[in-house]
Image: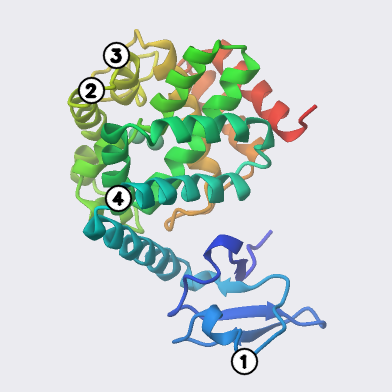
Amino acid sequence: MEPSEYIPVKASQLNLYRKIPFYYETSSGGFALYKPIGVTLSEMRIRYRMLPKRLYIKRKNKVEAIQEVQSEFNREIRKCIKEKDLVKVRGMVQNLVQVTLDEPVTGSLEGVSPTVNILVGEVTKNRDIVKVLFDLTSRDYTTTRHSVNVMALALGYAKYTNFDKHKMKVLGLSALLHDVGKVRINPELLKAPRKLTDEEFHEIKKHPGKGFNILGTCKFSNSEIRTTALEHHEKLDGSGYPDQKTDISQFGQIVGIIDCYEALTNDERSYRMAINPLSALEVIRTEIVDAGKFSRAIFKNFAQSLLNIYSPT
Ligand SMILES: [Fe+2]
Ligand SMILES: [Fe+2]
């Protein structure tokens, strides 16, 4: 099926766009302009009381739209930095998590959201963690959303496999912080809306090691959190990076699988289309698990934990 020329705007992002025009679906099934370029929706509402249920942007504006969301978010964050307001930063991180939970890419995460909120509440009391998260958030909105999604899915996994409270918390944190090394990677590479060259990919492959080092400087860091950052791209057959390990920690493996799944289903990457959850599981099973790169047992648990998320009891 041909993808539609229009894609819906996420509710949480409706007021962020100035440069991107919005469209609505007319009663005849066509699309018409709703918000022109140059104003935000909140400025328009003064003039128009009626807001269509769904607003859309043109698919060809997607890259530009992601850039605009990112820069708006950065502006807010910079304001917080200037005011040195830790409470506000906490609020922003919490808000980001909330938004992600309200509009997850993978379906409803209701089952885990209380745990996520408690975890985030605790996490954001720790200055070291806030600082690391802060660096990541202000640089790369897409990676931040990705990290929050990976954390939520990891907590779903922990709940399904009955991890105790402490283990659940450490896994959640490991998942949230697995990509912090990306703050030391050229942001242009992370945002490039195209396939990377070998050299560029070589640069990106340094983020696990960099993450390991950054987390080593944080007081809170227990060894699992650091190890997960280092190992989440390793594969059991030794084909991963950075160290071609075949002996990978449990959390490294869990976050590795979830990371793959999230990347395949996330629709906020500018350079390719997301696929649906079932297709993503199928791709991971046939191309990665069957090839001996991921543990079949962990994959099975993860797939089951997703079913739990979809149909909470
Ligand atoms: Fe990564
Ligand atoms: Fe990742």
The CA distance from mark 3 to mark 1 is 56 Å
Do the residues bearing badges 2 and 3 touch, measured as CB atoms within 8 Å?
no
Q: Is residue 285 left or right of residue 148?
A: right
Pointer 1 or 4: first along the chain: 1
Q: Quadrant of the C terminus?
A: top right
At numbered mark 1, what does the secondary structure look like: helix, strand or loop? loop
Q: Nearer the viewer, residue 218 or 104?
A: 218
Q: Nearer the viewer, residue 242 or 134?
A: 134
Q: Amino acid at mark 1?
A: Arg
At numbered mark 2, what does the secondary structure look like: helix, strand or loop? loop
Pointer 3 or 4: first along the chain: 4
Q: Which mark is residue 135?
A: none
Q: Which mark is residue 47?
A: 1
Foreground mark, 2 or 3, reads: 2
Residue at position x 47%, y 49% in the image: 96
Determine which quarter of the picture holds residue 115.
Answer: top right
Residue at position x 57%, y 79% in the image: 22
Q: Which residue is mark 2?
A: 219
Q: Which residue is mark 4?
A: 190
The CA distance from mark 4 to mark 2 is 28 Å
